[in-house]
Image (tube, rainbow, N blue to C red):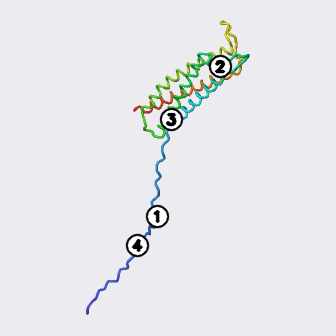
């Protein structure tokens, strides 16, 4: 008698296979957004405001001619107003150049790292020039408005009212330009101080 030991067949269990769609692509990785340098943007805006205020002040005072009883009142009759026009013309030209350079450094951040310190030095000098011009033109405008009884200078603004209005408006715009220059100096100092390693 032969004994046969047969082993029963072992059932084969197949593991479920996950199907991966060949058209499926990995999720897109977004490139990091370019970081906006708000200090550089503020500098460009302030330099443009300096340009606009310098040009407006010069145009207003140059067009301030008034004739009463065949006598003219013009800005070039006063050395202080001539200095005022010259100083604000220089400020306007300087602001055109620095606005373009600041805009270029905004687009290309590593363009010229020393540019900010050079701007700071010239901004301080220009603030002194524009402030002195504003003060001298303001003194002429005040004397024209109120006169000076101690020196026997009479009021002229009651006769040349248009001229005095233009000079006063031009001095006010120039005062705004002086404030913009002061803000530019503070902004430049802050930007430079951020670059100093601690």
In 3D space, how far apart are the residues under numbered discs 4 and 3 (Cα atoms)? 69 Å
User: Quadrant location of the N terminus?
Assistant: bottom left
Which residue is farthest left?
1
Residue topped by disc 3: 100
Q: Earlier in the sequence, mark 4 or mark 3?
A: 4
Which residue is farthest front?
70
Residue topped by disc 2: 74
The nearer-to-camera label among 4 and 1 is 1
Residue contact between numbered discs 1 and 2, judged by CB atoms under 8 Å:
no
Residue topped by disc 4: 15
User: Which disc, if any, is residue 38?
Assistant: none
Q: Nearer the viewer, residue 129 or 79?
A: 79
Label 3 secondary element: helix
Q: Which image quadrant is residue 74 in?
A: top right
Residue topped by disc 1: 24
Residue 126 visible in the current orientation:
yes
Q: Earlier in the sequence, mark 1 or mark 2?
A: 1
The nearer-to-camera label among 3 and 1 is 3
Q: Nearer the viewer, residue 123 or 166?
A: 166
Q: Position of residue 179 (x, y in %)?
A: 57, 26
In 3D space, how far apart are the residues under numbered discs 3 and 1 (Cα atoms)? 48 Å
In 3D space, how far apart are the residues under numbered discs 2 and 3 (Cα atoms)? 33 Å
Which residue is farthest bottom?
1
Q: Earlier in the sequence, mark 2 or mark 4?
A: 4
């Amino acid at each position: 008698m032969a004994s046969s030991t047969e082993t029963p067949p072992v059932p084969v269990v197949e593991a479920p296979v996950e199907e991966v769609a060949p058209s499926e692509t990995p999720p897109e990785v977004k490139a990091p957004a370019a970081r906006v340098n708000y200090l550089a943007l503020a500098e460009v805006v302030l330099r443009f405001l300096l340009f606009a205020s310098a040009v407006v002040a010069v145009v207003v005072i140059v067009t301030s001619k008034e004739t009463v009883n065949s006598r003219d009142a013009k800005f070039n009759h006063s050395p202080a107003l001539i200095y005022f026009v010259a100083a604000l013309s220089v400020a306007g030209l300087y602001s055109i150049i620095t606005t373009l350079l600041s805009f270029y450094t905004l687009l290309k951040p590593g363009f010229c790292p020393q540019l900010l310190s050079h701007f700071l030095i010239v901004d301080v000098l220009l603030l002194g020039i524009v402030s002195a011009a504003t003060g001298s033109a303001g003194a002429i405008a005040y004397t024209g408005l109120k006169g000076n009884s101690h020196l026997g200078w009479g009021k002229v603004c009651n006769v040349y009212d248009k001229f005095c209005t233009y000079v006063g408006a031009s001095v006010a715009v120039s005062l705004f330009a002086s404030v913009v220059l002061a803000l530019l100096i503070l902004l430049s100092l802050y930007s430079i101080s951020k670059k100093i390693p601690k």
